Amino acid sequence: MTKKTILHSAPPDGGWGWMIVVGCFFVTVCTRAVTRCISIFFVEFQVYFGQDYSRTAWIHSIVDCATMLCAPLGSYVSNHVSCQMGIMLGGLLASTGLVLSSFATSLEYLYLTLGVLTGLGFALCYSPAIAMVGKYFDKRKALAYGIAMSGSGIGTFILAPVVQLLIEQFSWRGALLILGGFVANLCVCGALMRPINLKEDLSHYSLKQEHNPNELNPIAIPSSKCSPVSLDCTHKSLCYCSQKEYSFLLKPNFIILAISFLFLAYGCSPPFVYLVPYALSVGVSHQQAAFLMSILGVIDIVGNITFGWLTDRRILKKHRYTCYLIAVALDGLSCLFLPILQCFELLVPFSVTFGYFDGAYVALIPVVTGDVVGTSSLSSALGVVFFLHAVPYLVSPPISGWLVDTTGNYTAAFLLSGFSMIFCALLLAFAKFVKMLKHKKLKMTVPTSDTRQEIWTNGDVTSPATDDCNHKEV
């Protein structure tokens, strides 16, 4: 007998949603914070295996790349199997990868275990957990995401000095073994991800029922799925399901956003990978270098929560897109000043600035994506968004490492990182400017009574008749 669940007319903006936020918070701690702390092992790996910067940097690149490259797989599992099952499986894989890494005998071994296996596990957890928050919140969505995504900053703040202490006490092998046990808590996080079914997601089933009252009752739906997309796929082909889930890929607004993510992903990765090695190269002690990561992490939390709260206010809610691109631009600008900061006292302001705006734009990524594609497609869209991060995450640390090996300093690496993020912001600003000109032209040339229909025709907003059909444009 099929288990029935309640069909919600709108996200509850509370209730069990806060438990979803807690679960997503700990998912980001166990995935993104742990990934950031891998940079603390950088010098240990380099010395132990006797390798240069670029070869050692591939470890961090592969785990980041695998996490993002396999993000669509995480979305697929959550849509068609279960969010809970996907996150639990991901936790098991990630924990196994870290435990096996403690027995490494070469960098190539770490590429496979710490890179591929752990990254795959993180992929099965990350995007489904983030998508679940978007299904439970609407009015307080940015705040909920700010709290959930702050797990990355809080985790970095706590784990950075703890990992450094574990390395000193138990060597890098013991530290990886302990981290493997810690990451196993992702299985507990998965158990919290109770599914929810929204009227917005299932409205096209109601339209279908009007023509065939005996087909597919939208209230009697399986509660094990994270997305209702799979319900309509029960008797359809895989090609039909894929087209239905990913129709947002043809939206011009999403295409521009997707291109910008490529430059953002390239720019944001090297500062996390090379901040500790750079600090050590200018004479900062190991503990102070680890403390810089902790500062970055705690300020990241402030950026997550305060920016989320601010952009939920009525005065800024309509301008979240602009707030997002400003945060990205200021983060890139701070990277441009990093090469001239050559003591601990000057590196602290960098950690504060970079950490705040990093937390700010990270909290808004799922919000901006959801505004473009809609809640019903958010899980699949986030899978694509994180997939787009994969290649930049893979190549940016090794390219930066090559620049360090070639030039003998970190200047070129940090400048390239900063300009990449600034270009991302300029691209989004240009797209917004073009859209504003287009709307202004429509207001001048189209009668008021027809303006709404004309805007639908030009694809800026989907019409009510088609919004339930995968947000296809008229």
Image (cartoon, rainbow, N blue to C red):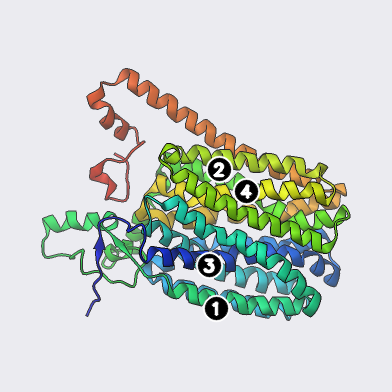
Residue 325 horizontal/vertical position (percent) = 55, 39
Numbered badge on residue 260: 2
Q: Earlier in the sequence, mark 3 or mark 4?
A: 3
Of the pair 321 and 1, the residue shown nearer to us:
321
Residue 182 horizontal/vertical position (percent) = 61, 76
Q: Earlier in the sequence, mark 2 or mark 4?
A: 2
Asked if disc 1 and disc 4 are in contact, CB closer than 8 Å, the reply is: no
Residue 252 vertical placement versus 202 (above, below): above
The amino acid at mark 4 is Tyr
Residue 296, quarter of the rendered image: bottom right
For the residues labelled 3 and 4, the Cα–Cα distance comes to 20 Å
Q: Which residue is mark 3?
A: 27
Q: Tell me the quarter of the image containing the N terminus.
A: bottom left
For the residues labelled 1 and 4, the Cα–Cα distance comes to 32 Å
The amino acid at mark 3 is Val
Disc number lying in front (3 or 2) = 3
